[in-house]
Amino acid sequence: MSALRELAAWISGTVYIARRELLALFVTPLAYLVGTLFLLNQGWNFSLLLRALNDPLAAPGPVMQFFFGGSFFIFWLPVIFICAALSMRQIAEERRAGTLEALLTAPVHASQLVVGKFIGSVVFYVALWLPTGVFYVLLRGASTLGPGAAPEAGPVLAGYLGTFLVGATFMGFGLLTSALARTQLAAAVGTTVTCTIVLLAGLLVDQLEAGRLTRVLEWTSLLTMMQEMSQGIVDIKWLFVHLGAVAVALTWAATAVDPRRDFQSLLRAASVTVIVVSLSVFAGRRTSRQDWTEGEVFSLSERAKVVLEDLRGPIDVTVMIPATIGGGRVNPVLGEVREVLFRMAKESAALRPRVLDPDRQRQQAEQLLIDHGLRGRDLADGVILIRAGQAGQLRRTHVFPRDLVTYATGPEVQVNGPRVESFRGEEALLTRFLEVSEARRLRVCMTQGHGEPALDNLEPYAGYAHLRDLLREANLETTTVDLSEEDALAGCDVLFVGGPQGALPRPDVRAIERYVDEGGDVLLMAGAVVRRGRAGIASHGLEPLAARFGVHFGERVVLDPHQMAGGSPLLAFTIDGMWGDHPVGNSLVHRPISLIQVRELWLDGGAEPVLSVTDGGWAESDVDGFQLGRLQQFDVNVDRAGPIPVVAAGTKGGARLLVIASDQFALNAFMREDVLYDHGRDLILNAVGWLSERDVLLGIRARPREHVKLVLQPEQLRRMNILSILGLPGFAIMLGFLVLWSRRR
């Protein structure tokens, strides 16, 4: 009980000192002057941010990377200044005024004095930052005035959390400096120098050779922390790092203030330092890294974790991406790649990632490029080199930064220039890892000679060249087969019949049937082929085979009023709902798919619908009317009302069949990733993945990035600038005058 009473008395004394410190801060004119200058600086920085985002030539981007930690003069200098200004008077002023001895002769311990003053200064520091929350509200409101997306709340909260941790640590250092200094000026200078050294120490990480000191600097780098926080990455280890730093600083400050200090007190402070540092390191190594972005850009999907667990290694991954881009700005792709690789390495012991700066280690980087058969100019934007195996079993591949992102399309890009819309590094990296780790690549056999678009034809509306490239980029071996040859399908993992324009010869059909009877898997893309001068829909000859799986082809054309952009009304449509509960479509729920000239399907037996048109679609029986240009309308007597399956899957024995009742959507014009707005590519990859039971192709998709773009009228921008530059400082001045007036009364 006595220990509890002592603890209660200690807490009571600490609260008294904290209240006394807060009263001194909130009634001192100097505090309001500091607050006014701080808010004026932050308002000016925010106005610069508004102008940058509102510039028609500026590309959208994540706002918090511009505001928190993006510049020494915009973020770090004000933080160091405010911490030095608040902490310089805490003990040095008490000592100068002669009140320090009086405080310590009262029933107040040195630790109570130090902790109470620290709490008071940190509360005042938080109070200074609270008004800047108006900036987020303004951005939310401004983004609704234009086409840009609103800033995400997660990175904003992470940025403020990082700001609080940095401020608390700097305040602890300032308190220690104030306890050692004799004057406020000396305390302010000492705090500024100490905090600047701690901050700039993070820059030495890339300058030193790998070693224990480098790991320590990297583990405690404030620059790295704020860069991660501004992206929405919250590593819990930072809480323990800053908590440990504050505890050590306050321990030594209490020792310096205590007039009864002796050798034992110094030894006790040293022991506390060792214990606190050890506990911080121990706890920090067992923490998790959280992703606070709305799109979960940095989180690994469950499918990726499964793939990584089964990955065979070792696989060496060398990241050679420049740390900065134009104007000295931090390269966001490098941060995202490092984060994803860090998370992957924790899931798989097969990965051995390392980062090599191509600007500082140019000679080594160029030699690695030569080993991988690349050229020096490939270092301009960077490259990721991947290798596995030794000697004759050595396998190499590489990934460029452009392969890790998806660029936005549309008229906006013509004005603002290229903009990264989403990050797809998880999928791209895993594909390359499998490429070097798998002993044999899956083989997709593609039929030709029955009117199918040629695989080497680059014409926008007549070839499948981009479709072939899509499969190869997914680490699939593609080859064309001549079904008339004996054992043409031997060694095929998936048979791809895409876009036949007429009935396959009977020998070719029998070859496919034998392949299926032996457990082979088939992807059949066959739409509504209407030939000029002929009635009805042309048969492709595989209708009886599909019927064995419960998938039946009808004689009508499926129409839907959800028109596809740039396509023929009704015949070409985009749908984003009606996905069935099937592995092929599970990762595509609520994502748009565009289809062209869809043939009617109906199912029985064990066949499952993967994707269907809505109730607004129907199967049109007047097929010949399309050639005559007749306007098609639903006729309840002869047409079939939706929903109607347009993608279906069936299993029979050990064989699988997936039917997509359209083939023109896979033409080159619709497979180009740089102009694609729907997910036809993903549908094909998921289909091949399900057929080959290669689940790595399922459920791993691009993660949307935060992008804020303002389109404000000059008057709107002027009002926001006035509010940010004059409003908040004016609020601090008004509050200071109110306090001064109340004191005079």
Image: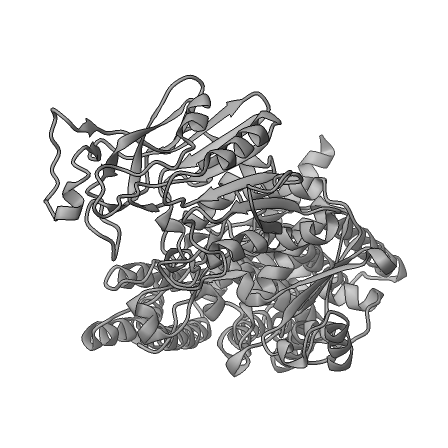
Asked if one can make out residue 163 in the rendered structure from this viewpoint, the answer is no
Image coords of residue 42 (percent x, y): 42, 73
Above or below: residue 354 compared with residue 628: below
Colouring scheme applied when the structure was drawn: one colour
Which residue sits at x=56%, y=41%?
484
Q: Which of 604 and 189 is in front in this view?
A: 604
Question: Could you tell whether 536 is left or right of 391 in the image?
Answer: left
Q: Name the residue furthest top.
A: 605
Q: Nearer the viewer, residue 376 or 23?
A: 376
Image coords of residue 50 (percent x, y): 34, 73
Above or below: residue 689 compared with residue 278: above
Question: Could you tell whether 676 is left or right of 378 in the image?
Answer: left
Above or below: residue 309 compared with residue 463: above
Question: Could you tell whether 388 is left or right of 473 in the image?
Answer: right
Image coords of residue 694 (percent x, y): 61, 39
Asked if one can make out residue 460 in the rendered structure from this viewpoint, the answer is yes
In the rendered image, the quadrant that contains the C terminus is bottom left
In the rendered image, the quadrant that contains the N terminus is top right
Q: Nearer the viewer, residue 561 or 359?
A: 561
Question: Could you tell whether 374 is left or right of 606 in the image?
Answer: right
Image label count: 0
Image coords of residue 401 (percent x, y): 57, 66
